[in-house]
Image (tube, helix red, strand yellow):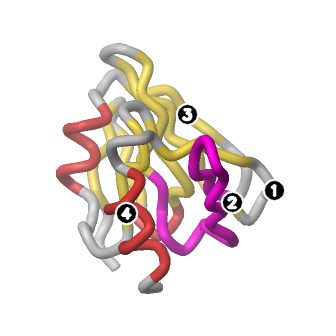
Amino acid sequence: MDTIFIGSRSHVRPDSIKLLVSDINYTVVHFLDGTKTLVSTTMGTIESRLPKENFVRINRSTVVNRSAVSHYFIRPEYDEVKLQDASFVKVSRRRRMETREILNSK
């Protein structure tokens, strides 16, 4: 698989990324091996470089790798994604139905 440019002179394989978390004009890239790096590239720019079939934006500030998702929970108040490292990320109300369809089709 090819590598993508994430910023800070860094190129990574998309399948090594667990999730992206935005922080204004910066992005924290979390990797499957537990490491993370802060880059000065916006999350939208990095998201546009990622393969669309493997990544899904679940809220305004988070993009998740579909292969890193272990469970999808439907709660009365909100939906939630459980990642393989046992961390949880809330799904936004507006992206709820789209995220359900994408992740449950996996």
- Residue 31 lies left or right of residue 57; in this view the side is right
Residue position for label 4: 55
Please report contact status of discs 2 and 3: CB closer than 8 Å, yes or no.
Answer: no
First in residue order: circle 3 vs circle 1: 3
Q: Which amino acid, mark 1?
A: Ala
Q: Which residue is mark 1?
A: 86
Q: For the point 62% across and 60% down, which residue is it?
A: 74
| Above or below, 40 relative to 63 | above
Residue 56 image-quadrant placement: bottom left
First of labels 4, 2 by sequence position: 4
Give the number of the disc on residue 83.
Answer: 2
Q: Secondary structure at mark 2?
A: strand
Answer few, some or many: residues within 10 Å of disc 2's Cα (few below 14, many 20 plus, some between 14 and 19): many
Q: Quadrant of residue 101?
A: bottom left
Q: Secondary structure at mark 4?
A: strand
> Are the two marked residues, 2 and 1, in contact with CB atoms closer than 8 angstroms?
yes
The residue indicated by pointer 3 is 37
Closer to the chain start, of discs 2 and 3, is 3
